[in-house]
Image (cartoon, grey):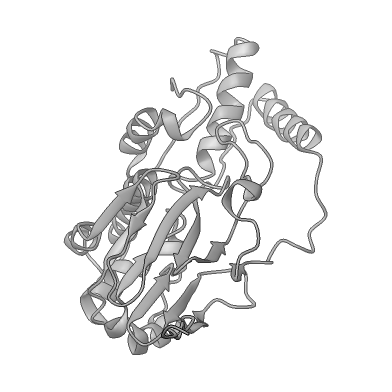
Amino acid sequence: VGPRVAVTMPQMKVTPVYGAGKNGALCSVLKIDDDVTLLLDCGWDDLFDVKAIKNLAEVAPSVTHVLVSHPDLLHLGALPYAKKHFGLDATVYATLPVHKMGQMYLYDQYLSRQAVEDFNLFSLDDVDAAFSSFKTLQYSQTVDLGTKGKKVLITPFNAGHLVGGTVWRINVDGEDVVYAVDINHRKDRHLNGANLEQIFDKPALMITSGSSSLNQPVNKQVRDRDFVNSIMQTLRNGGNVLLPVDTAGRVLELICLLERHWQQNKLGGYQLFLLTSVAYNTMEFAKSQLEWMNTPFTT
């Protein structure tokens, strides 16, 4: 009988840093044995309460890699502050649209707040410094994190919620871990829906969110029809319509809806405006990322 080789499976532990059980900013840690610590998202909300992210200060110095799933504040809003104040010094992995649109989100937050108050939690230079540590990936592109003693591979897949939004598959010595938060299975005007069957079969561990699991699904056609009818009724009665929107996420779906309705009904007499501090750059980036979407932007 030849020599026997003992094979030990990696020990994996998931710890929510904050956001578990809430519909808000997300941040968790996936620890693999003692030498790999993945930070899964690094979110903040628009209240920018430092106390809300205080737990991040304890884990940030030990983080070896950061995986960001979406470009909005709830998934990456705390990156500049954590990089500057908490000792977060790890490479950040995301898709190109998450990198580009994430910058737009944070630029917009800073510029909008600086216009009305002395906002000093982070500066535009801090945002640039945080995003200089990004490595961008294409969907289905696998990257070896180069960890010692084990093989850790990461692969992003379409999450269907925001442009570039990602379901992460993390393969650890042949075992799959799936990080899938804020996913959308339905096809939108500008995005294809997530296809989880493409991503995994039987993962060893799946990390997901259930904030919308109790919501009743709505009929999309009825919702959009009622929404557009409400807008047109106001306009034809001589009014104006002001819609609060995000910086560079679901606003793109809204633009697709309104632009198509305007073109089909020749509504040139009513003008559409996108009013944010970074509106021009947001639309230019959107036009340059058509391979991540399923419709062109001409606005």
Looking at the picture, tell me which residue is in the foreground, 169 or 245.
169
* Near-viewer residue (238 or 131): 131
Q: Position of residue 241 (x, y in %)?
A: 59, 35
The quarter of the picture where residue 39 lies is bottom left
Q: Nearer the viewer, residue 78 or 168?
A: 168
Q: Residue at x 61, y 30 (%)?
A: 189
Q: Is residue 67 above or below residue 197?
A: below
Q: In this view, does 158 lie above or below 212?
A: above
Q: Is residue 184 visible?
A: no
Q: Measuring 58% from the left and 61% from the top, which residue is drawn there?
A: 181
Q: Position of residue 206 (x, y in %)?
A: 61, 68
10 above or below 177?
below
Q: Can residue 288 be seen in this view?
A: yes
Instruction: Name the residue at 37% across, 46% down.
Output: 101
- Left or right of 88: which side holds 101? right
Pinpoint residue 143: horizontal percent, then vertical percent.
Answer: 34, 55
Residue, far front? 1
Quarter of the figure with the C terminus = top left
Residue at position x 16%, y 60% in the image: 125
